[in-house]
Image (tube, rainbow, N blue to C red):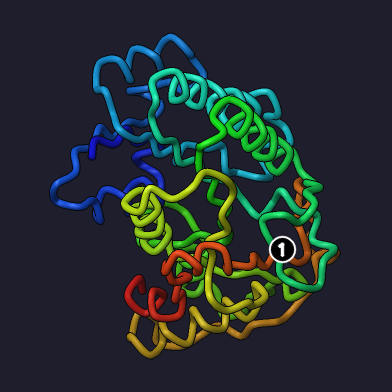
Amino acid sequence: MKVLLTGANGQLGRCFQDRLPTDWQIRATDSTKLDITDLEQVNSAVLAFKPDAIVNAAAHTAADKAESEADLAERINAAGPANLASVAAQHGIRLVHVSTDYVFDGNASTPYTEESPTNPLSVYGKTKLAGEVAVSSAAPDAIVVRTAWVFSEYGNNFVKTMLRLGKERDALSIVDDQRGCPTYAGDLAQAIIALLQQNAAGGIYHYAGDKEVSWFEFAQAIFSVAVQKSVLSKAPALTPITTAQYPTPAHRPAYSTLAGGKIQGLGIALSDWQSALNKTI
């Protein structure tokens, strides 16, 4: 299989390249090699490489910055995926597009399914939802994978931030009233590979961690492992706080646990994030 990968330098993009099956070919691109917001560039890249599949791991993921960069977020998260989908449909190429739990408002109390009503609260969430709609409209057989709370050994993420702050400070205050499922980017990459190998039906799939926690509980788990692995000599004192006590430009869903039954039905296991956290640290 020949795969055109966007967002190659992000967490998912790098994990995807690490796990690429040996008999697959890849063209790994970042924004300097392929501007997905430019339809002509997308079409030229596809004609030159002739991929069997496109995996779109490119996104404007800085939720707070997106509030002041709405036009840029819209181009990358909505217009770009629309270009990829239209070219994929035109040439009969499978497209896997990665989306987010931020398409939900967080008012639920049970895990969100693929059919749950969307109601994003932030520019990031709204532009990602617009991308989903554009992809599904232009390429009905495209696969949209919603994920959440992604971490890995690469890039910037909550695990790395906690480890850095744990070395710098004796005490930290962590939000305890937002709940979701951490997801290891390597597991997400493996799930996308499995979906392509199975030639899975188009549509939306949820893929996230197998256990729900708050950010505070996630931080506790991170520091427990870090001390156990001697990455830190001791854990900082953690204080649980509310979202109201830590205001941010972007409104985040208070509850964004994703139900993974649909993808599990294909024999694809959810992210065992606690095991992955051990390996990552």
Give the quarter of the image for residue 266.
bottom left
Is residue 50 shown left or right of residue 63? left
Residue 140 rendering spot, x and y as whole percentages:
57, 33
Residue 193 rendering spot, x and y as whole percentages:
34, 53
Residue 107 rendering spot, x and y as whole percentages:
85, 63
Is residue 236 shown left or right of residue 126? left
Q: Is residue 31 above or below residue 251?
A: above
**Residue at 49% of width from left, 78% of height from top?**
222
Q: The residue under label 1 is which amino acid type?
A: Tyr
In front here: 209 or 281? 209
Q: Which residue is identified by label 1?
A: 112
In front here: 5 or 33? 5
**Residue at 19% of width from left, 43% of height from top?**
24
Q: Is residue 157 above or below residue 85?
A: below
Badge 1: how crowded within 10 Å, few (<14), some, or many (20+)? many
Give the quarter of the image for residue 240.
bottom right
Residue 181 rendering spot, x and y as whole percentages:
59, 70
Indicate the quadrant containing the N terminus: top left, top right, bottom left or bottom right. top left
Is residue 5 shown left or right of residue 149? left
Query: Outermost residue toward the top?
Result: 40
Disc 1 is placed on an element classified as: loop
**Residue at 24% of width from left, 22% of height from top?**
49
Q: Is residue 32 above or below residue 52?
A: above
In front here: 35 or 53? 53
